[in-house]
Image: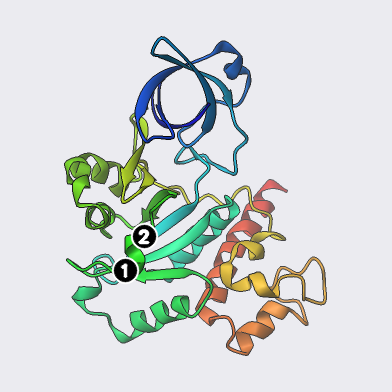
Amino acid sequence: MQARIVKIVSKEYTLQLDDGSRVKATMMGRVRLQDKPVTGDLVEYEEENGHYAVIKIMPRNNRLIRPAVANVDQALIVMSVKDPDFSTALIDRLSILIMYAGVKPVLIVTKCDLGIDEKTEREIREYENGPLQVIRTARDTLDPALAGVLKGKISVLTGQSGAGKSTLLNTLDPDFHLATQEISKALGRGKHTTRHNELHEVAGGLVADTPGFSSLDFSRISKYDLAQYVPDFVPYIGACRFNDCIHQNEPDCSIKNAVEQGLIPRTRYENYLQVLQMILDRKEKYI
């Protein structure tokens, strides 16, 4: 029988069964020979006299390090139009890390009721016209596209502190207000020291209670691979004159040509160059 690990506290595991019920379980000795179990893992279990035991961890689609969650479907980048300010640099850096992890990025723009200046409106529309799914939200209103965004999926939330992550979850699922204080502390800060790790049920889906991608670490990404993790670049990958093109100074670069033709926003390309430079600087330090 299969279930999903939805909570880990020290060595105590909580499973969510097919019928939605949650039970405590122990980990069989032979499972410890596999990778360390994390929330989100699909597992096989045995039950005898009301005692549940995990006997196998199923293969994972992906596994995040911070937060430690497996089989994540999407990462919601929560970004406000102001207080704090909208940041394309942060969105693009988070999108790269999310794509690298094998997860789908979704941009949630919050506080739209506060008014949007011309520059921010232009930046949001550039995302809306690109491959990223973008959902705008305002206080006390629920976009129909937002209502089903969590349903049936495992999600992590990331973005600026103060952008309204916990408010967003409460809007999606009013029953969630009981956990607001606890989860807002976890979601609102990059610092999360407790060993408690849980997937919460929100609006028909499961949401990780730890900060997603709180550390912007590009150390594992090669300069040759970076472009494939920029959603707007994906259609143009492989069409450059040189196979090892890093889309910086090379001639006949399909991505630079797409930028010049207005097919890729220039801001997206400039943000890519900043991350590329970080990777190049890092490599030089190791030589």
User: Number of labelled discs?
Assistant: 2
Q: Is residue 90 visible?
A: no
Residue 269, placed above or below residue 103 = below
Quadrant of the rendered image containing residue 140: bottom left
Q: Closer to the camera, 243 or 39?
A: 39
Locate residue 226, reporting x and y percent.
65, 61
Kindly indicate whether the residue at mark 1 contacts the one at mark 2 (C-beta within 8 angstroms).
yes
Numbered circle sitting on residue 144: 1
Question: In the visual, does 221 lie left or right of 76?
Answer: right
The reply, left or right, for residue 166 in relation to residue 219 is left
Q: Residue at x 62, y 23 (%)?
A: 34
Q: Amino acid at mark 2?
A: Gly
| Label 2 neighbour load within 10 Å: few <14, some 14-19, many 20+ | some
Q: Can you identify the residue that label 2 sits on?
A: 148
Measure the C-alpha gap from mark 2 to mark 1: 7 Å
- Expressed as whole percent of the image width and height from the top left, the position of residue 219 reads 60, 48
Residue 25 numbered mark, or none: none
Asked whether 103 or 55 is in front, the reply is 55
